[in-house]
Image (cartoon, rainbow, N blue to C red):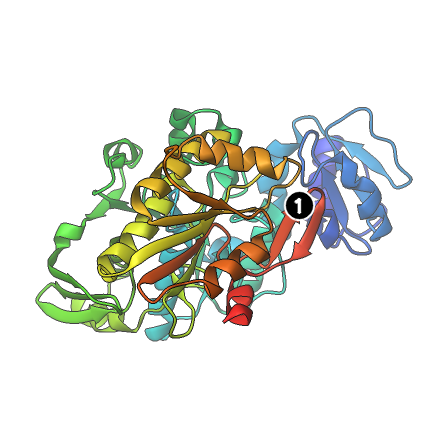
Amino acid sequence: MNIQQLLHNIVHTNFDFTIKNLWLNSKQVKNGDVFIALQGTKQHGVDYIHQAINNGCSCVLVDSQDVKCVVPTIRIDNLSAYLPTLAQRRYKNALSVDVIGITGTNGKTSVAYFIAQLLTQLDIKNALIGTLGISHAKAHHTHTTPDIFTLYSALDNYAKSDIKIAVLEVSSHGIDQGRIAGLNITRAVFTNFSQDHLDYHKDLNTYQKTKAQLFSLSSVEFAILNRDDKYFDEFLKATKGKKNINFSLKDFDYIKPSEQGFLVTLKNYVLEIPLLGRFNLLNVLSAFNTLKTFGFKDETIIPLLHKLSPPLGRMQKIDQHLIWVDYAHTPDAIKNAIKTLQEHYPAQKIRIVFGCGGNRDRNKRHKMGRIASKLANSIVLTNDNPRQEDPQSIINDILDGVDDNYNVEVIQDRKLAIETAVTTLKDDECLLIAGKGHEDFQIIGAKKMPFSDIEIVKNAL
């Protein structure tokens, strides 16, 4: 059954035009495409119909009675419920791709990147979808987990390119908004859980239960879980009927940190893993155990672990300098990043540059301030995508968690803050620039401007 026939069965309307593609994102619409305008969605709602029409859409599907426009408009009650079926009808090959879904507050990008690297080393064609974009495809998106039609379109293209495995970062927003509905997710990976996104989920319990939904999907065969996380039992409950594999730092018989990473013993193999941070050892175990579910043996996978490299903006060392750029933007991530440098460089003091995003979870700001002031030797507070909020108000929220006796330097201009921290860095200091990692933009007010922490550091050296 084609899209026209499916829509006819839903709304009993004949279509005298050919539907090429269905899109939720108005920017992706081209001549002959259908734009789906969901009521009340910030990214893909009725406010973007005009843009979709300008891009050539031939029809608009809506779930609101109040929408009028110059192209045919079809109203469908409970429109969002039909999206998985519409996506599957249009992108028929998408379900032939085996999807590995990775969720957790931190570590999703690194785990996905490590799994993809290992599969590639084993000569298995694969694709990666997540915070850093969509590999092996021309589509672009601004979310960790793209909208459902972008996802299905990418997977359909993968299948046509003979790519059988896709590694997907699954955000709580993506789960809650049905972006992964109906996908062939056969493996679900849990990295860790801590506070984030409470501006969206309202409370920690709702956030946790939303993430856990990934593991109860009927398509999931294997659940790969971090048993060192205090929420392990809660996620384990969601895996009933699945094949469970869990991992822990205790799986290593020996761990010794170095300036390059860790010397470890795993399953009687002695090797160096060239990644900083014990959290990255857990990320490596995530990837290792995921590969085992495909039937690969220890002796095949373990020798490849020393070749792993971190993704862009994840504890990324800038050249040969003691300067790192990291995406850490939650209390737990900030703590782990600082402790990582303390463990690998025990003789060095730690200086950190960070801020908090505007129009996001305010409750984590003072917690990040408290953690940074307890662990770091010096702090420079600055902007981090303040959006429509007053930058000084955000900084004040962070300062609420800092002891009054702690001397904090405040430089709102993030470029100047980074340049100042780099040019004044002492020989006995490490510098951590946290919050934006790979991002190549800065959002101030309604303006999204080019901005890269990594490039600013390199230019300041």
Percent coordinates x, y for residue 318 in the rendering: 43, 69
* Local crowd size for mark 1, using a 10 Å CA cut-off: few (<14), some (14–19), many (≥20): some
- Residue that sits furthest to the right in the current view: 70
Report the front residue among 108 and 426.
426
Percent coordinates x, y for residue 151 in the rendering: 56, 52
Q: Is residue 282 above or below residue 370?
A: below
Report the front residue among 65 and 372.
372
Report the front residue among 192 and 236.
192
Name the residue beneath numbered marker 1: 444
- At a point 25% along the width and 62% down the height, the residue shown is 345
Does residue 248 appear left or right of residue 437 in this picture?
left
Do we see residue 91 in this rendering? no
Q: In which quarter of the image is residue 238?
A: top left
- At a point 35% along the width and 61% down the height, the residue shown is 430
Does residue 56 appear left or right of residue 173 in this picture?
right
Q: In which quarter of the image is residue 11?
A: top right
Query: In the image, what residue type sits under mark 1?
Result: Ile
Does residue 257 appear left or right of residue 403 in this picture?
left
Report the front residue among 45 and 4.
45
- At a point 27% along the width and 69% down the height, the residue shown is 274
Q: In which quarter of the image is residue 44?
A: top right
Percent coordinates x, y for residue 444 in the rendering: 66, 45
How many marks the image carries: the answer is: 1
Q: In this view, does 408 lie above or below 281?
A: above
SS state under label 1 = strand
Do we see residue 439 in this rendering? yes
Q: Is residue 44 above or below residue 323?
A: above
